[in-house]
Amino acid sequence: DGACPVGIFETQAAAHLLFTTRDCLRADQSTCYDKTSKYYEVTHRGLDAIMLRFLQEVDMFAKLPDNLAWPNHTLYIDISMISPKDMYDGMKTLQSLFVQYMIARLERVKLIHTVLLVAT
């Protein structure tokens, strides 16, 4: 249903990555857009902004008449300039943060079980 796991918002790092970071999200920082690029603003506003922009542009591109829906269309170019690196690398980072969060939670459960086992 597209729901976001609640646990993702329990970490400051994930919330920062999604909503407040102004950093480039690419794994290879040397390929980040500079301030003169038209893609700089959208790629330095957090993962949420990148994903929303991607979804909006894909939706607009999908609604184009067939005679305009070509790879040289501005929308297609914009999608291809943002999603392969900025959004993908940001999603990989978010996934990693979520996995770290879940592992930490499971370690706490393991500790509780160990303490209960010893106590009984």
Image (cartoon, helix red, strand yellow):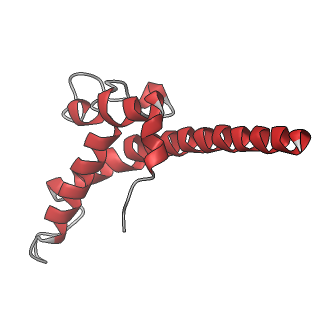
Q: Position of residue 99 (x, y in %)?
A: 60, 44
Residue 45 lies left or right of residue 10; in this view the side is: left
Residue located 67% across and 42% down the image: 103
**Picture quadrant where residue 25 is located:** top left
Tell which residue pokes out farthest to the bottom in this image: 66
Horizontally, residue 117 falls left or right of residue 95, namely right
| Residue at position x 26%, y 52% in the image | 54
Residue nearest the viewer, comparing 95 with 10: 10
The correct choice, above or below, for 64 with respect to 103 in the image is below
| Location of residue 120 in the rendering, given as x and y in whole percent from the top left corner | 89, 45
Residue that protrudes farthest toward the top in the picture = 35
Q: Using the rendered view, name the quadrant where residue 70 is placed.
A: bottom left
Indicate whether 58 appears above or below 116: below
- Coordinates of residue 31 in the picture (x, y in percent): 42, 30
Residue at horizontal 61 percent and vertical 44 percent from the top: 102
Of 10 and 74, the residue lying toward us: 10
Q: From what the image shows, is residue 23 above or below residue 68?
A: above
Residue 119 position within the rendered picture, expressed as x and y whole percent measured from the top left: 87, 39
Please tell me which residue is depicted at 36% across the width and 37% down the height of the picture: 18
